[in-house]
Every structure is written in structure tokens, then in C-alpha cells.
Image (spheres, rainbow, N blue to C red):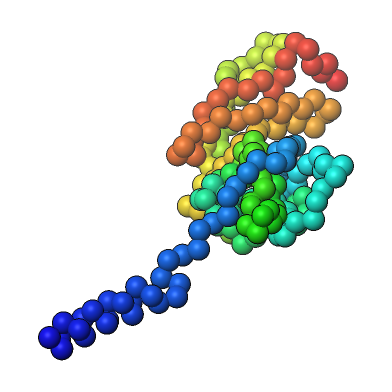
Amino acid sequence: MSNKWMILVLCVFVWNVPGVYAKAPPEERMAFTAPYNVQVVVIDKTISLSWQWNKPDALTSMKDFGFDVERSDEKVFFSKETTYQDKALTPGIYSYMVRVRGLSKEKGKWVKLVSQWSEPISGKIVALCPAAPRIELQVTPTQKVYSSIPSLRFRLQGMVHMEKTCTLSNAKYHLDTGRGIAHTGPLAVDKAGKFDTFVNALGPEDEIP
């Protein structure tokens, strides 16, 4: 009999420990217009966000009033201003949404007043290259002998060598005759870093001095 009473007492003690049940979160209620014109600026490892919001003419005093900034990994940050900086980020693409929020007490209970989330916007952190790329280049004229030079074309072949942590966003070629005639254009480079293309050094439209 004494053992049974001991079990009963222990059970009653456990179920009455304060904090066993978490406090229910406050009710959420739509009460504001959503932030808009969200902008991002990426510098080094930091993504800076800014946005606009039309503040109501009559805004009651609220606790913890400000803006939730939700990142694509579902982490939520808080800002009292219409700006936020996400720092020390690793390379990758990050998306963000912003909403208004504040706590108001109604009939003795806290209510979380919020807006809809803004449209998502993204920023990309790119790894810094430890060294400049190394270029292998071979330039070959499309023909070796010209009776006249109405046009002059070259074949550009080569390879762009970069560190594994680097990403090539774009490449361009630039040809300069040294006599005021120059041509610049995009250079198509494949995933392995190779390029092979034909470009015009001189054309009918160029005035040869």
C-alpha cells in the first residue's frame, strides 16, 4: 500500500510543476498595410535591406512595435527602423520578406497586430577570389594574305583559369588597333573555362587612317 501511495504522490508533483505547459502565443490579427519597395544592397558579406511603409495617421501605442524580417532559412529578425543589415553571411543566395508587427493589450490579453508579408527579394553573396584569373589566349587571323582589307577577323581561343572558390560572372574581349579603332564585346566561356569565338577587328564601317 505504501508503494502505491508513493507513485501517486510523485505523479501529482510532476503534473503540477510550473512551466510544464508553454504559454500560448498571442493571437495574430491583420491590422496594417504591408511594407513595399523593398531594396537590397550587397557589399562584401553583408546584405542591407530598406523598405517603405505607410504609417497610419492614428497609431496607438504598442509594445515591441517594428518590423519582422524573415530570411529564406525561416530565421526571423526584428528591426525598429525601415532598414536592416544581415552581416557575416557565407556565399549563397538569400531571400527576404518584411512585415509590420506590434503587441497590443485588449481585454487583458496580448494580441499581435501584423501586416501581410512584402514581396520577396533576394541578394547574392559571392566568394572573394584570392587571386586574379589566369588567361591562356591564342589569336589567329581567319586568312593569312589580304589583297585589300575591307574587313579583318580573328579567331580567339583559350582558357580562363580560376581558383575553385571563384565564379566567373562574365568575360569580354577588347581589340585595339592603336589608331583609334577598337572593338569590345562579350566573350562566351563554358563551364570548364574554355572559349573559342570569331571577332571582327576591322569592318566596312571602320575608317582606316
Q: Residue at x 64, y 52 (%)?
A: 111
Please state which of residues 208 and 8 is positioned toward the viewer in this rendering: 8
- Name, please, the residue furthest toward the bottom: 2
Q: What percent of the width, then of the height, locates residue 63?
A: 72, 60
Q: What percent of the width, then of the height, locates residue 116?
A: 64, 39
Q: What percent of the width, then of the height, locates residue 74?
A: 52, 50
Q: What percent of the width, then of the height, locates residue 163?
A: 51, 53
Q: Is residue 7 left or right of residue 56?
A: left
User: Could one spot residue 111 in this view of the protein?
Assistant: yes
Quadrant in which the C terminus is drawn: top right
Please state which of residues 12 and 191 is positioned toward the viewer in this rendering: 12
Please state which of residues 73 and 64 is positioned toward the viewer in this rendering: 64
Quadrant in which the N terminus is drawn: bottom left
Relative vertical location of residue 24 with respect to residue 141 in this rendering, above or below: below
Query: Residue 198's quadrant in the figure?
Result: top right
Relative vertical location of residue 11 with respect to residue 35 in this rendering, above or below: below
User: Could one spot residue 124 in this view of the protein?
Assistant: no
Relative vertical location of residue 201 with respect to residue 22 in this rendering, above or below: above
Query: Residue 180's quadrant in the figure?
Result: top right
Please state which of residues 42 and 19 is positioned toward the viewer in this rendering: 19
Q: Is residue 155 left or right of residue 14?
A: right
Relative vertical location of residue 35 with respect to residue 45 in this rendering, above or below: above
Q: Is residue 9 left or right of residue 85?
A: left
Q: Residue at x 82, y 42 (%)?
A: 56
